[in-house]
Image (cartoon, rainbow, N blue to C red):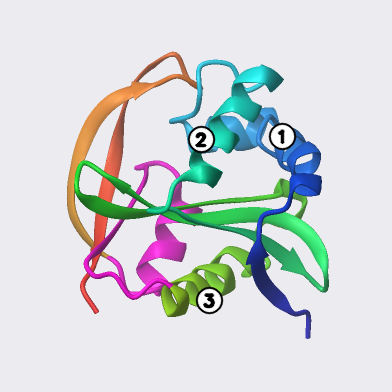
């Protein structure tokens, strides 16, 4: 059995995370991404901002000690939301679900919210298996797709 762990992000993780977060298929599935996933300066500035915030729990996801993604809980408009990004080479192996379970142990805030493009069935499944319940949908502009798409909003109360 492989071991998924979370650890604080390190400066040395940034190159690998930048590469993961610009994979075209991953970007398309995430849909709601930064203006230009290939803009390293914007990535570095964003990561510096969120790593300095005290209301963000940002963790590296490792599989048997190897960095395979990141996961975070952050406050936006008064609500705490979760987000995660797993290397596409490791999709379908339950890593996001195990990482989310670990983050939920670390972050006691409830309710927690999660959002995903409504056609991102894998991400919605991860959230639902962790106990998140659908509370609504919205339509917003998805930069990665260049159009407005539907987003599913989920909530975890306990």
Q: Are marks 3 and 1 in contact (CB under 8 Å)?
A: no
How far apart are labels 2 and 3 at the CA level?
A: 24 Å
Q: Are marks 2 and 3 in contact (CB under 8 Å)?
A: no
- In the rendered structure, which segment of residues is drawn in magenta? 107-132
Local crowd at mark 3 within 10 Å, few (<14), some, or many (≥20)?
some
Q: Which mark is residue 102?
A: 3
Residue 130 forms part of the magenta stretch:
yes
Q: Nearer the viewer, mark 1 or mark 2?
A: 2
Relative horizontal placement of residue 95, taking residue 30 as reference (left or right): right
Local crowd at mark 2 within 10 Å, few (<14), some, or many (≥20)?
few
Q: Which mark is residue 18?
A: 1
Relative horizontal placement of residue 111, taking residue 73 as reference (left or right): left
> Tag 2, which secondary structure?
helix
How far apart are labels 1 and 2 at the CA level?
A: 15 Å
Q: Which mark is residue 49?
A: 2
The image position of residue 24, as x and y in percent, is 67, 27
Task: Give the mark nearer the N terminus: 1 vs 2.
Answer: 1
Q: Residue at x 49, y 55 (%)?
A: 72
> Tag 1, which secondary structure?
helix
Position of 145 relative to 122 (above/below) = above
């Amino acid at each position: 059995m492989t071991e998924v762990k979370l650890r604080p992000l390190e400066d040395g993780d940034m190159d690998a995370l930048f590469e993961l977060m610009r994979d075209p298929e991953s970007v398309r599935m995430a849909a709601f991404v930064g203006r230009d996933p290939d803009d390293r300066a914007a990535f570095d500035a964003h990561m510096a901002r969120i790593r300095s915030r005290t209301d963000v729990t940002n963790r590296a996801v490792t599989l048997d000690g190897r960095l395979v993604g990141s996961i975070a809980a952050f406050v936006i408009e008064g609500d705490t939301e979760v987000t995660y990004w797993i290397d596409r080479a490791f999709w379908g192996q339950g890593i996001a679900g195990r990482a989310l379970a670990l983050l939920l142990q670390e972050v006691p805030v409830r309710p927690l919210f999660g959002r995903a493009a409504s056609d991102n069935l894998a991400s919605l499944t991860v959230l639902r298996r962790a106990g998140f319940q659908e509370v609504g949908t919205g339509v917003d502009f998805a930069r990665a797709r260049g159009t407005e798409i539907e987003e599913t909003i989920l909530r975890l109360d306990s």
